[in-house]
Amino acid sequence: MSESLSQLFREKGPIRTIGVVGMGYVGIPSAVLFADLPDIKKVYGFQRSSPTSGYKIAMLNRGENPLRGNEPYLSELLQRVVERKKFSCTPDFSRIQHCDAVTIAIQTPFRNPKDLEPDLTPLLAGIRNVGKNLRPGSLVVLESTITPGTTTGIAKDILEEESGLTAGKDFGIAHAPERVMVGRLIRNLQEHDRIVGGIDDASTQRAIELYSPLLTKGQIIPMTATAAEVEKTAENTFRDLQIAAANQLALYCEAMGVNFYDVREGIASLKEEGVTRAILWPGAGVGGHCLTKDTYHLERGVKVLGRSLDWPPGEQSLFLSARAINNFMPTHMFHLTVDGLKRAGKKVEGSTIAILGWAFIADTDDARNTPSEVYRDLVVSDGGEVRVHDPWVKEYPGVEISTNLEEVIRDTDAMAVFTSHKEYRNLDPPSLKQGMGTIHPVIVDGRNVVNPDAFIRQGWIYKGIGRGDKNGHEIVEGG
């Protein structure tokens, strides 16, 4: 079957028209990079005209970037390909009929991680829209992070059902997972190696043809579709595990009265051929769309593929334990806040606390699954008032966010730093204290962005993740 598909691809000729389904953090930069290639005639960005995201269509067609935050080169590229009429955004999925290749980049969150059941509704709807308009000789690539077994299973079944065509004979399917980080989308797409896995050799080779021109430094790494699914979920799971290891060590350091960052420096110094002790950084919590759920996709893969797992009886998955640690960190921030307020003779109830940073990652507006929200809910449930400052995030459902730090901190009792925005790296202890109007304000540093001693000298009560050497400091009177 693969040979007949290869022949069909040869008859169709080189890929000249591309469709990108899903205009988000992955779809938009991918689309404009494809459109900027000299051999590509046209790229269509497909976006539902929904109440929540339909506004992107008009913005994109005007050459305006709907993604806020610092994304080098993205806005310039978008404007250029729109002016050259090489890219346009549309809710009309019938135009997929004109595409040689279609990529799908739609989020795959979990409804409830406890039951390991993802909400694939948006993704499957996107796949159905593609299938209804699929033509022989086309290639469909899933870029969404998905449970292993999805490409050769439900995705393939839906495409065949909706199109009346046969995968591997009439059209190709591949999985080429995105590997991008907000704040560096264009660079990541061009420089990171690209994992490409088709359901057969013909699909893999066609996908390699699609992605190779995008790469400036990265290389193509081919494998099977299922292996590509495992690779992507494992990639993020391992990063989550590494962060959890740093977080757990930071909690140990706090309990034992030592500085995590001294310990980290010592660990990381052990380097020789074949030996490394690389260690990441602890923090106020892990947010975003990927790390918070990809472990569950990996865990679920064994079930979806119908395989058995040999495992120590009664032991929880190491990866799920890591998730639990990282999910706990906003709660730990709350515990540090309680301790800090107690030292100031106060309780959370009746106190006003400023959250600095609603985005989950520095210098962006990406607040998906932000750990700040968990902390906010804990403070409110304990009778405290919360104000939120973020220089990048303009709005978030149910949360009032201000860009005016002076107004946010006025008459507050404590502040908790949740995001390492550049604006928080030079906070001035005296002026902040004066603005808060309290003798011993509390600062809880969840990202190691402030100098503890500079705040302590001014009469602040300092608490920081991993700072066991400072968390019990003497309170300076009259600072």
Image (cartoon, helix red, strand yellow):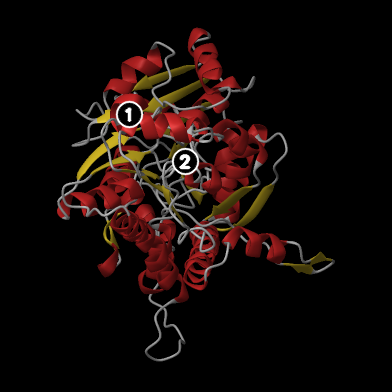
Q: Secondary structure at mark 2?
A: loop
Under mark 1, the amino acid is Gln
Q: CA distance from mark 2 to mark 1?
A: 52 Å
Residue 111 % position (x, y):
24, 57
Residue 340 % position (x, y):
35, 55
Residue extending furthest toward the front: 478
- 136, 70: nearer the viewer: 70
| Residue designated by label 2 | 458
Q: Secondary structure at mark 1?
A: loop
Say whether disc 2 or disc 1 marks the residue closer to the N-terminus.
1
Q: In the image, is residue 437 above or below residue 200? A: above
Q: In the image, is residue 363 above or below residue 245? A: above
Residue extending furthest toward the bottom: 313
Q: In the image, is residue 440 above or below residue 258? A: above
Q: Which mark is residue 14?
A: none
Q: Quadrant of residue 459?
A: top left
Residue 260 % position (x, y):
58, 62
Q: Quadrant of residue 238?
A: bottom right
Please tell me which residue is depicted at 45% across the width and 32% down the height of the picture.
430
Label 2: how many residues lie within 10 Å, few (<14), some (14-19) or many (20+)?
some
- Report the side of 107 relative to 17 (left or right): left
- 323, 279: nearer the viewer: 279
Residue 299 % position (x, y):
41, 70
- Report the side of 198 relative to 409 (left or right): right
Please tell me which residue is depicted at 53% across the width and 23% down the height of the picture.
74
Is residue 369 visible in the rendered image? The answer is no
Under mark 2, the amino acid is Gln
* Camera-side mark, 2 or 1: 2
Is residue 420 visible in the rendered image? The answer is yes
* Quarter of the figure with the C terminus: top left
Q: Which mark is residue 47?
A: 1
